[in-house]
């Protein structure tokens, strides 16, 4: 079974900037909590990504950090696709 892809254009953050949820207001699944998004990605049910205007995309990955798992995009030459820099939802 192929995993469903979900475009993310907003993110919910706490006051420290930690990602709490992934959002796309035009989608039925939004908002998706951090815990549920991590479970979706790790189980292979869904893939989340930040879409670009030119049709390319940046994948959202699960990272094991010192305080537990979190979501992030890989660093590249722009901050436009960083989850912290997306508009709030």
Image (cartoon, rainbow, N blue to C red):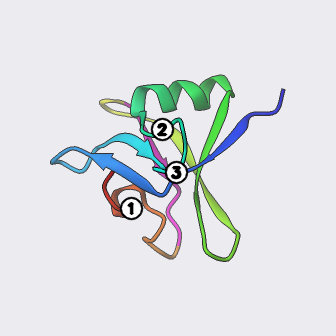
Q: CA distance from mark 2 to mark 3?
A: 27 Å
**Which of the two discs, 2 and 3, sits closer to the camera?**
3
Horizontal side of 82 relative to 4 (left or right) equals left
Question: Callout 3: helix, strand or loop?
Answer: loop
Disc number at residue 56? Answer: none
Residue topped by disc 2: 63
**Rendered location of residue 19, percent (x, y):** 33, 44
Q: Secondary structure at mark 2?
A: strand
- Bounds of the magenta segment: 69-76
Most common SS among magenta residues? strand
Q: In the rendered structure, which disc, 2 or 3, sits on the residue that comes first in sequence?
A: 3
- Earlier in the chain: of badge 2 and badge 1, it is 2
> Can you give x and y, in whole percent of width and height, for residue 2 in the image?
82, 33
Q: Does residue 44 sit above or below 11 in this rendering?
A: above
Residue at horizontal 52 percent and vertical 35 percent from the top? 29
**What quarter of the picture does the N terminus occupy?**
top right
Quarter of the image holding residue 10?
bottom left
| Labels 2 and 1 touching (C-beta < 8 A) | no
Residue 73 versus residue 32 in the image, above or below:
below
Residue 34 lies in magenta, yes or no? no
Corner quadrant of residue 51? bottom right
Badge 2 crowding class, 10 Å Cα cut-off, few under 14, some 14 to 19, many 20 or more, is few
Q: Which mark is residue 26?
A: 3
């Amino acid at each position: 079974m192929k995993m469903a892809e979900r475009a993310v254009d907003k993110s919910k953050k706490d006051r420290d900037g930690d990602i709490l949820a992934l959002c796309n207001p035009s989608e039925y699944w939004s908002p998706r909590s951090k815990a549920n998004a991590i479970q979706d990605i790790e189980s292979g049910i869904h893939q989340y990504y930040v879409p670009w205007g030119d049709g390319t995309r940046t994948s959202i990955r699960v990272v094991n950090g010192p305080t537990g798992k979190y979501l992030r995009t890989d660093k590249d030459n722009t901050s436009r696709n960083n989850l912290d820099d997306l508009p709030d939802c």
